[in-house]
Amino acid sequence: MKKWLPTALLVAAFLSSLYVGATQIDSFWSALINPGSNEILWQIRFPRVTAAVIVGAALGVAGLLAQGACNNAVAEPAILGTAAGAAFGAVLAISSGLVEVGTIGAIASGTVGALLTTSLTFKLAALRGALSSFTLIIVGIAVSAIFTSLVGIASAMASRADARSISFWSFGSLALITSDNLIGIAITTVIGLVIAWQIAPSLDRLSLGDATAFHLGVNVARIRLLALIGLSILAGGAVSTVGSIAFIGLAAPHIARFIFGPAHRSLVRHSAIIGGLIVVVADTLSRTIAQPNELPIGLATALLGAPVLIALVTFKNNVWRTQ
C-alpha cells in the first residue's frame, strides 16, 4: 500500500486540478473521456496540469541528484545556483529576441545557463583543495544570489513583456503553458531521468564518502559530472519554461527518502512522483484560493513543502543520516 500511495495521490490531485478552476466544466467526466470536446479542459487545463507533473518530477529528481553528487542533505538546484543560472540563460536569450518562452531554444538556453552556473559553483568551491560540502553550499548561495540579481536586472531592462515579468522568473508560474511547451520540457525531463536512473547505484556508493566509493570501483569525478549534467538538464528545462519554483528540489527527495529508504533507484522514481504531486497541488491552490487573481506557484510550494520538511527533521531526524 505504501508503495502505491504517492502515485494514487498524484492521480487524484491530477483529476481534481483538471476539475477545479474559475470556470465550471459541465459534464466533466464526459468531457474527460472525449479528448478535444471541451476547449477549457483540453486546451488550457490539461496542458497546464500535465506541465505541473513534468516540472515537479524534473525538480524533484534534480534535487536528488544535487544531494547525491554533493553528499549533502541541503543541496538543491536553488542553493547550488542552478535554478538562477537557468533563469538567467533563458531571460538573456528571450530578452535579446532570439527565442520565445517555452520553446526549444529557451530550454536550451536555460540548460546551458544552468550547466555553466553549477560548474562555476563547483569550481569556486574547490579552489582551495578538496571539495567541502560546507564550502559548496556557501558558494552556491552566493552564486545563486548574484545570478538572481542579474535575472532581475535583465528582466527590468528588457523591452519584451514575457521577459519583463520578474515575478514569473522569481516565483514561477504555469500560466503561460501551452500544448507546444510540453514537448521541450518532456524531452529534457526524460533525458535527465535516464541519467539519474543510470547513475543511481553509483550514488548509493558515493553516499558512503568519496574515498569509500573509489575503493568500491566508482569513478567519483565521472559520476559527479554526470549528476551535474543531469541536474542542469532537468532544472534548466523546468526553470526556462515556468520560472523558478522553490522547495521542490529540497522537499521531494527527503519525503521520498523518509517513506521509501535511501536506495537511489527507488528515490529517482518516488522523488519524481512526489515532486509532481507537490507542484500539482500547489498550482491548483495558486489559481483558486485568490480568484480572480493568481498567486505565484513558488509561494504555494514553499508553504506546502516547508512544514513537511520541518516535521521530518523534528520527528524523524535520522532520515538525514543517509546523506
Image (cartoon, helix red, strand yellow):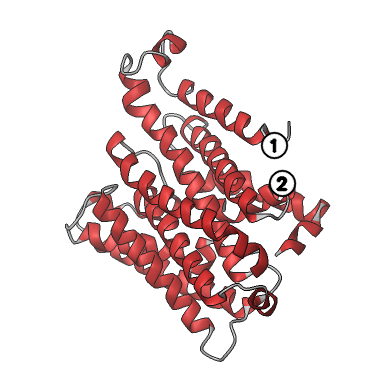
In-image side of 280 versus 26 (left or right): right
Tell me the crowding category of disc 1: few under 14, some 14 to 19, or many 20 or more residues within 10 angstroms, Cα based.
few
Query: Does the image show residue 26?
Result: yes
Q: Position of residue 178 (x, y in %)?
A: 30, 36
Q: Is residue 41 above or below residue 72?
A: above
Task: Indicate left or right for 296 with 176 as reference.
Answer: right
The one of 175 and 203 positioned closer to us in this rendering: 203
**Mark 1: which amino acid?**
Lys
Identify the residue at horizontal 66%, vertical 73% (top origin): 213
Q: Is residue 123 left or right of residue 201?
A: left
Q: Is residue 283 above or below residue 190?
A: above
Instruction: Tell me the element at label 1.
Output: loop
Say if mark 2 contacts mark 1, CB within 8 Å: yes
Disc 2, SS: helix
Q: Give 279 or 198, whichever is nearer the viewer.
A: 198
Q: Which residue is mark 2?
A: 260
Q: Looking at the rendering, in which quadrant would you find the N terminus?
A: top right
Pointer 1 residue? 3
Residue 71 image position (x, y, % from top left): 64, 69
Residue 80 x/y as whole percent? 51, 68
Q: Residue furthest bottom?
A: 128
For the residues labelled 2 and 1, the Cα–Cα distance comes to 8 Å
